[in-house]
Amino acid sequence: MAYIKVVGEDEADGKLFEIYDEIQRNRGRVSNILRVQSLNPKALRAHLDLYMATVFGKGGLSRREAELLAVVVSAANGDQYCLTHHSEGLDRHARDPEWVKAVAKDPAKAKLNEREAALVHFALGLTQHPGKGRKEAVAALKARGFIDEQVLQATEIVAYFNFANRLSLGLGADLEPDGERDYHY
């Protein structure tokens, strides 16, 4: 149960109704991480736009890489809500549930290719020590072949999930039951 009032789909009107209707048409259902922002439809709209522009953006990262970043950041922040959702997303692209569990538990011990290891190192550094060594961290990604657009997208995804994790943790977004997390993307 969220820590604040949440407006459900059956109570929504005006702008919130329009946003919920769009989400249901595009994704099949409204997730709890979005419902916790129901009292501020303008911010909810911006949240949706930011999510689509970062995770599904044209920066050059694969969906697997984007979901990997989501899982690593969410695990580092202790956000079970986003960790569960994006572990499921990562598994859709990796098709290896044991590997996904290993990444979520301890990415340093998971079998990562060089590119994935670089992204994980970058994500953990930016999440855990955001003011330390950023110039060097970007240079390390570029030394491994990442282009500027990919570095930008990785940074945006890491920043987005730090934002989303704080919404989830700060407002008590409950994890939906197993059968209610089948969103369309």
Image (spheres, helix red, strand yellow):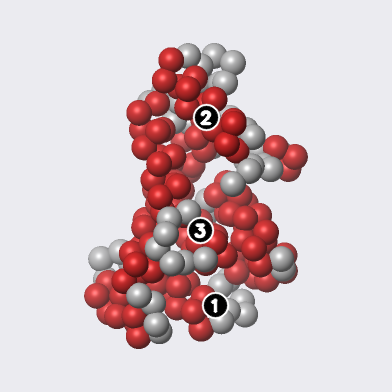
Q: Which amino acid does label 2 sit on?
A: Glu
**Residue 173 position by quadrant:** top right
**Residue that numbered label 2 is attached to:** 22
Provide the secondary structure element on which disc 2 rests.
Answer: helix
Q: Nearer the viewer, residue 87 or 182?
A: 182
What's under tag 3, amino acid-wise?
A: Ala
> Residue sitting at 25 percent across and 66 percent down?
131
Neighbourhood count class around disc 2 (C-alpha, 10 Å): few under 14, some 14–19, many 20 upward: some
Give how far apart the Cα atoms at labels 2 and 1 are. 39 Å
- Is residue 180 shown left or right of residue 117? right
Q: Which label number is shown at residue 134?
A: none
Residue 85, can we see it?
yes
- Residue 70 is labelled as 3
Say which quadrant the N terminus sits in.
top right
Residue 139: % across, % down: 29, 80
In the image: residue 35, left or right of residue 136: right
| Residue 107, x across and y down, in percent | 56, 73
Q: Can residue 141 be seen in this view?
A: no
How many residues crowd mark 3 within 10 Å: few (<14), some (14–19), many (20+)?
A: many
Give the residue displayed 40% in from the left and 50% down from the top. 53
Badge 3 marks a residue whose secondary structure is: helix
